[in-house]
Image (spheres, rainbow, N blue to C red):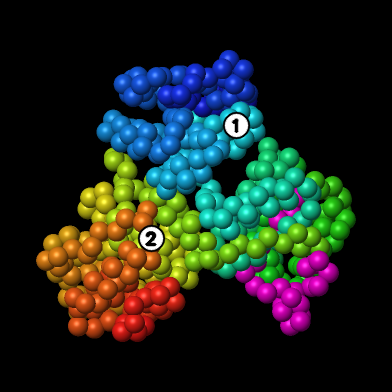
Amino acid sequence: MNASSVNVIHAVWLDPFSPIETADRAQLSTAGISLETVSTLGDLTLALRRAHMVVIRLGDSAELLQEVQTLVAQLGHTVPVLCRVDRRRMEVAVDAMRLGALHVLSADEWAPQAWKQAVKGLNAPELKTKSYVFVDPTSQHLLALAQRVAQTEVTALLVGPTGAGKEVLARVLHESSPRAKGPFVALNCAALPEHLIEDMLFGHEKGAFTGALKEHKGLFEQAHGGTIFLDEIGEMPMQLQAKLLRVLQEKKLNRLGGETTIDLDVRIIAATNKDLKFAIEQREFREDLYFRISTFRLRIQALKDRPGDIMPLVMQSLTRHGKTGLPFSVTSEAQLLLEGYPWPGNVRELENVVQRAVVLCTGRTISPAHLMFDDAMTDRELSMSDFDSATPSATVSREAVGEFSPIAVRSSPEPLMPINLGDAVKTSEHQVIMAAIQSTDSRMEAAAKLGISPRTLRYKLAQLRERGMPEGVSA
C-alpha cells in the first residue's frame, strides 16, 4: 500500500515537541498513511474534515488527548485518535487507553509493519475502529509471548474461560505473523452439526450430494496463505477429529465427492474452554489430535484475574457503542464497582454491561445507577422502571427493580465520599463501603446503595478485611 492507493489513510499529525523528519514520513507512507501536519488545535479544527485519523504526541499526561477528543466531538466528527508516547511514560500510555485511544505507539516507532498493525482495523473509506487491550501486566506478558509464538509456524492452542477473548488473541497471533497479509478465517466448531462443519472445513465438488450444484471451497482452502482459527475445538465430533488429524499431518485435503488432492498452506490456531486432557480420558477427544494442535499452549486468564484491563476495555467499549458527541466518562464509584465485580462472563459480559449503561445513561457520565451486572438479572427482564432509575433524583422501589438489582440505588441527601483512584485504592474503597453500610439498615440495603449484589459486597468486605480493615465489621 502506498500514498497513491485508493485505500490510503489520511492522518492529521499533531506533535508539539518536534517536527516529523522526511525519512519518517516516508516510512508511514509505506504503511499506507498520508500525513497532514498541524501545529495547533486551531489548525486541527480545519484539517479534521479531511481526516480518517488523528495522530498526536503526548508528553507527561494524556491531557492533549482529552482536548482533541472534546474538539472532535464538538465538531460532530467520529475520528479515531492514535497516541504516540515516550517509552518511559507507561502510565501515560495506560491513561490514553483508558480514555479510548485507537492505539498507542512508542514515539520512536517508525516501522511500517507496526503502523500497519496499529491501523489495521481502520480502512478508508469504511472506517472501523479496532484496538486490542493488553494493559494489565498479566496481559502484557501474554502479548509478548504471543508475538514470539507468532513468528513461528507452530500450531497454537488457546485455553481459557468462555468470553475471555480467545479469538482476539488468535487475531493477534495472525496479525503479528509473517502471514498477516493473508486471510484470517474462523469457525466455531460447536455452532453447527457435524455434516455442515465437514462441508465448511473441507468443501465439496459439484454433485457431491443432493443440492451441490457447484463446487465449494472449504475454509481450509479459503485460508490459504493465512490462518484458520478453530474455536471450541473440544466440541468437534470424534469422526471429524480423525479427518482433521489427517489434514494436519499431510497438509493436504480432498473435498467431499472429490478425488483431487489439494495442497494446503495454512497455520492452525485452535481454542477451547474445556479440559482436553479430561476429555481424552472420557474418550471424547483424540489424544493424537491434542498433541498435534497443542505444540504451544497459551492460557488466557479470566478478566477478574487481570484487573488492569477492565477500565481500558470499558472505555474502548464506550467508544464503540456510545452515542455520537462528547466522550463518556465513568465516575470513581462506578469504576470501583466495575473493577471489583468478578465478571463470570468475562469480556463478553463486560460488553453487555457497557451497552446497558449507554442505554440507561441520559447524559455523558456513567454512574453506579447505570450498571446492571448479569448476576443480578436472573429471572427478570429489563422494564421501564430501569430507565426511570437512571435519573439521578429518582427513588426506586425494590418491587419495581428486584431485590438484587444494581439499578436499585436510592438517592441520598449526602453523596458518597468522592474517590481519587490515584490515591490508595484500599482506603477509598473502604470509605465508600463503610459509608453505605453506616447509612443503611442491612447489608442488603448497603449492597443496593452501592449498586452491587450482596454476594459482591461480601466478596469486597472479605478483601478489605484481608487488607487490614478495622475490626468490628465482619464480612
How far apart are labels 1 and 2 at the CA level? 34 Å
**Is there any visible trace of residue 445 in the rendered image?**
yes
Number of numbered tags placed on the structure image: 2
Task: Name the residue at 65% across, 43% down.
Answer: 175
| Residue contact at pointers 1 and 2, CB within 8 angstroms | no
Q: Residue at x 25, y 55 (%)?
A: 361
Sort mark 1 into few (<14), some (14-19) or many (20+) by Cα contacts within 10 Å: some
Residue 269 in magenta stretch:
yes
Towards the viewer: 402 or 314: 314
Say the numbered circle drawn on residue 404.
none
In the rendered structure, the answer to whether residue 347 lies left or right of residue 250 reads left
Residue lying at the far left of the rendered structure: 413
Residue at 34% x, 65% y is 427
Q: Image check: 29 left or right of 333?
A: right
Residue 285, by quadrant, is bottom right
* 242 drawn magenta: no
Q: Residues within 10 Å of mark 2 (few under 14, many from 20)?
A: few
Q: Position of residue 252 (x, y in %)?
A: 85, 52
Q: Secondary structure at mark 2?
A: loop
Q: Is residue 284 visible?
A: no
Q: Amino acid at mark 2?
A: Ala
- For the point 68% across and 60% down, the residue is 298
Pointer 1: what residue? 109
Q: Position of residue 448 (x, y in %)?
A: 26, 74
Q: Is 58 in front, or is 154?
A: 58
Magenta residue span: 267-291
Type of residue at label 1?
A: Glu
Earlier along the polypeptide chain: callout 1 or callout 2? 1
Q: Which residue is mark 2?
A: 424
Quarter holding the C terminus is: bottom left
